[in-house]
Amino acid sequence: MQETPVHTITGAQRALSKEQSDRTRRYLISMGIRTGCVIAAIIVPGWPRWVFIAGAVILPYLAVVVANAGRTADEAGEMGVEAQPQIALPSKATALEGVIIDRPLT
C-alpha cells in the first residue's frame, strides 16, 4: 500500500505580515544602535570615537541587507506547535470486511 504524504499546519511558513514585522523590528534595533553610535561619537573623546563613527557608517548598510534578506524556510514545528502522531481510521472497505449486508451502503 502506498502512503500519501500528509501536510500539516506545522509545516507551513510564517505569515508574511509576521515576517515583515520581524524585519521591521530588526531594522529599528539596528538604527537605534546606530543612533547611539552617532551620539557616542559626539560625546566620547579619543580613539573610541573612531569606533563609534565606523559603527555609525557601517550599520545602515548592514541593517538594510539584513532587513531585505528575504524569506527564510522555517523548520517544521518552529511555530511552537509539535506534530502529534495520529492513528488513521480504517477505510469503509476494511471496516466492513467479513460483514454481510443485505441492503446497499449509503
Image (cartoon, grey):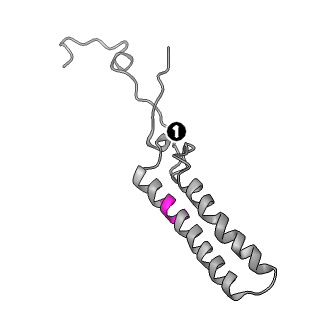
- Residue at (81% x, 80% y) in the render: 47
Left or right relative to 50: residue 24: left
Which is the main secondary structure of the residues drawn in magenta?
helix
Q: Is residue 37 above or below residue 67?
A: below
* The image quarter in which residue 72 lies: top right
Left or right relative to 101: residue 55: right
Position of the C terminus by quadrant: top left
| Front position in the image: 28 or 11 | 28
User: Disc 1 on helix, strand or loop?
Assistant: loop
Where in the figure is residue 66, as x and y percent of width and height? 59, 55
Where in the figure is residue 33, as x and y percent of width and height? 62, 73
Of all residues, the one furthest to the right in this rendering is 47
- Residue at (52% x, 47% y) in the render: 70
- Residue at (40% x, 24% y) in the render: 90
| Front position in the image: 80 or 84 | 80
Count of numbered marks: 1
Instruction: Identify residue for label 1.
Output: 85
Crowd around label 1: few <14 · some 14–19 · many ≥20 (10 Å): few
Q: Is residue 3 above or below residue 36?
A: above
Q: Is residue 80 above or below residue 88?
A: below
- Residue at (75% x, 80% y) in the render: 49
Left or right relative to 52: residue 96: left
| Front position in the image: 5 or 106 | 5
Looking at the rendering, the stretch of residues picked out in magenta corresponds to 22-26
| Front position in the image: 37 or 7 | 37
Q: Is residue 28 magenta?
A: no
Q: Is residue 24 magenta?
A: yes
Where in the figure is residue 97, as x and y percent of width and height? 37, 14
For badge 1, the amino acid type reads Pro
